[in-house]
Image (tube, rainbow, N blue to C red):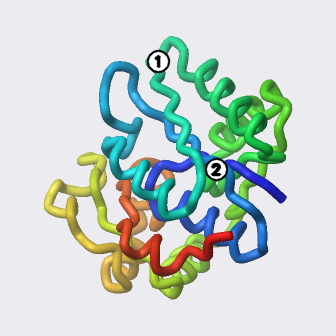
Amino acid sequence: MKFSASFSGGKDSTLAIKRMLDQGNDLVALIVSTKKGQDLSWTHNLEYRYFEDVGQILACKVIFTRAGLEDYEVQFEEALKTSKDLGAQACIFGDIDIEGHLNWNRARCRKANIGCIHPLEYEKRENILDEFINSGLEARIVKVNEDYLDRSYEGRLLDKGLIDYFKENDLIDACGENGEYHTRVEVWSIEKYLKKI
């Protein structure tokens, strides 16, 4: 199956792509939610160059939404339609179990008339994190919500020790699903550990 992926650069969206590729599916496009008038992605604040490098490694098109708050949904739906024109039958997302996020994704895909897949849907945090670490992919924390973590965590490698700390802290979702922290998967590890079609 040909698919597109909503890609933040973080561990969960990258793991979702890895699973699809490992099953023999064909990635045709990365959809990256970016800020209108800025060279940055939403939430993770990563530069365009990062996504262009990943797109080159995975031999797929990168579609930037270039959206503001007022047209975020419309621009995302347009990106989905563009990916469909490239042959994508479905778009995948790295969301796990926040119903509002899952339903938003489904609604955008319905409007664009494209399938919607959540490869990590309702899975246990421990299983997702263990799979990510064991995959060889490497992620660093690039942004934290200071209501949960102080800024000293920015730049830290997401390794087993740090994950164990998150698992033991009842105030933090171990995967950062509520925005406690955001990660960037290192380009070299994507090149090494993601199977390309």
Residue 88 to residue 104: above or below: below
Residue 118 to residue 140: above or below: above
First along the sequence among labels 1 and 2: 2
Residue 69 to residue 153: above or below: above
**163 or 138: nearer the eye?**
138
Instruction: Specify whether 71 is left or right of 149.
Output: right
Q: Which residue is mark 2?
A: 5
At 41% from the left and 75% from the top, the residue drawn is 189
At 61% from the left and 55% from the top, the residue drawn is 94
Q: Position of residue 178 (x, y in %)?
A: 47, 49
At 47% from the left and 22% from the top, the residue drawn is 67
Q: Which residue is mark 1?
A: 69
Dot 2 amino acid type: Ala
Instruction: Specify whether 106 is left or right of 45.
Output: right
Q: Position of residue 93 (x, y in %)?
A: 65, 51
Residue 48 to residue 12: above or below: above
